Image (tube, rainbow, N blue to C red):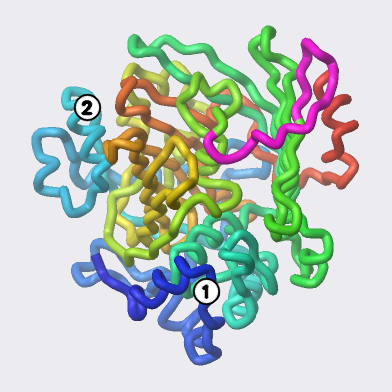
Amino acid sequence: MKKLPLISLAVSIALSGNVLAKTSPEQAAKLGKELTPMGAERAANKDGSIPEWTGGITKAPAGYSPGDHHLDPFSADKVKYTVTASNMAEYKDLLTPGQVKLFETYPDTFKMNVYQTRRSASFPEHVYQAVKDNATRAELIENGNGIKQAAIGVPFPIPENGLQAIWNHTLRYRGEQVQRQGGQAAPTASGSFTYIGFNETLMLPYGTKGASPEELEKSNILFKFKQKVTEPARLAGTALLVHETMDQIKVPRQAWTYNTGQRRVRRAPNVAYDAPGTASDGLRTTDDFDMYNGAPNRYNWELKGKKELLIPYNDYRLHSNQVKYKDILQAGHINPDLVRYEKHRVWVVEATLKENTRHTYKKRVFFIDEDSWQVAVTDIYDNRDELYRVGVAHGLNYYEVPAQWSTLEVYHDIQSRRYLAIGLDNEAKMYDFSVELKDRDFTPSALRREGRR
C-alpha cells in the first residue's frame, strides 16, 4: 500500500482537532492534467491492467432513453478470470480482509468474476470546475464535524487526511434532485426473503448547479431525504424525513418519523450512528446507509494511502430489468454470476472508535474508488477486533446525469451468515433525476401527508 506524503503529520493533526492548510494553487493546478478533475491518478498503472482515465462515459449508449433501466455499454466484455476460495491466495493482494472472509465463509458458492477495467466514472463539466474551486478554499471545521467554503463537487480532491476523504464520499455528486423506487431484502440462511418496498426522494442543495458556499453556510443544509415504506402492508406508510446539516456542531442532523399506528410525526434524534436501520432485521446501522453517512465525530480517521483492489464496477447486469429479485437473492450472498468485478485504485481510510465513545463498530476500513469517491467496500470490526460485517456497493454510471453511484448495496453479517441488500430496483421504476422537488416537500407536515397516502 502506498503511503502518502506527510501522512503521519496528517494523522496527528486530524487527531488533535486542527485543520491542515488548504491545497496550494500549485497542487490544485494538477487537477484535469496529471490528475483527473476529481483528483484521481489519470495514468494507467504499471502493467496497464488499470487503464488511463480518458473522460469516462460521455454519452448514453444507442437505444437508451431517460427513464429506462440503464443499458450495459460493456455487455460484450468477457470474464478475464474468476477468483474462488481455491485460488484466492493468488489474488490476496487485490482483496480486502473482509472479501477474504467471504470466500472462507462461503467456499463453495462465493466467487468474483473479474472483467476488463473500465474507468467509466464521469461528471458534468460544472462539477469538475467546482471541484477545482473547492480544492484551494474548502476547510474542515470543528474537529472535522462540518465543512465550509465548498459547494457542488467534492471538497478535497487532493485529501491530506482521513476526514477529508470521508467527507468527499459524503458530498460526492449524485445529481441535484432524485426520486427513486425500489427496496430491500434480508434473506434468511435458507435464502427465503420478504421484499420491503420504498419510495424515496432526495434533494441535494449542496450539489445544485450555481450553489455557493455562502448560501450553503447560511442555510446549513447539505441534503434533504424522505423515505416512505410502500410494502408489505404491515409496514406500508411508515415514513422517515432527514435534514442533513453542513455544520453539525451548529445544528446536528434533524430527523422525523411517521408511524402509521400512532398517526403522528415524531422527532427522531436517534436516527444516527449505530441505531438499527429501517426494517433491516438488525443487519445494518443507520450510519451504514450509503456505505457511510452522518457526523464523523465518534471516530479517529486515518488516511492509509492507496491500493489496487477488485471491486464491483459497471454492474449494469445486476441493475437490469431483465433480472428478477429472486434471481439476485440467494442464501449467503447475492448471485455472483450477476456481479462484475474490476481492478481499480482505491483510497484506504481507517476509522477507529474514540476512547470513551460508544458504537457497535470498533473499527471500520473504507475502500474508496479514486475516480468517483464512492465507498466501494467497507470492512467492519466489532469490539473484540473480529470482522463483523462487510459492506459492498455495486456501482455504475448513471450516464443521463452523468454521475457514478451504487445500484445495490449489500451488507454481509459474517457472524449470523446473513446479509441485507438495499437498492433492489430491477422490478421498479427507474431513478428520475429530472424530478422537480421543493423545500415544502421535505417538512414534517409533508411527511405526515406522505405517510397517510
Relative image position of residue 315 (x, y in whole percent): 43, 41
In the shown orientation, is residue 111 left or right of residue 181?
left
Residues in magenta, as a range: 257-274
Report the quarter where the N terminus lies: bottom left
Q: Nearer the viewer, residue 300 or 441?
A: 300
Quadrant in the picture for residue 394 = top left
Q: Looking at the rendered structure, which numbered label has been put on residue 37?
A: 1
Query: Crowdedness of circle 1 by 10 Å Cα count: few (<14), some, many (20+)?
Result: many
Asked if residue 263 lies in the magenta stretch, the reply is yes
Relative image position of residue 295 (x, y in whole percent): 59, 51
Residue drawn 57% across the image and 47% down it: 293
Residue drawn 10% across the image and 44% down it: 89
Alpha carbon of mark 1 to alpha carbon of mark 2: how far? Answer: 40 Å
The residue that label 2 is drawn on is: 105
* SS assignment for the magenta stretch, majority: loop
- The vertical placement of 249 against 180, above or below, is below
Quadrant in the picture for residue 198 = top right
Q: Closer to us: mark 1 or mark 2?
A: 2
The amino acid at mark 2 is: Thr
Asked if residue 266 lies in the magenta stretch, the reply is yes
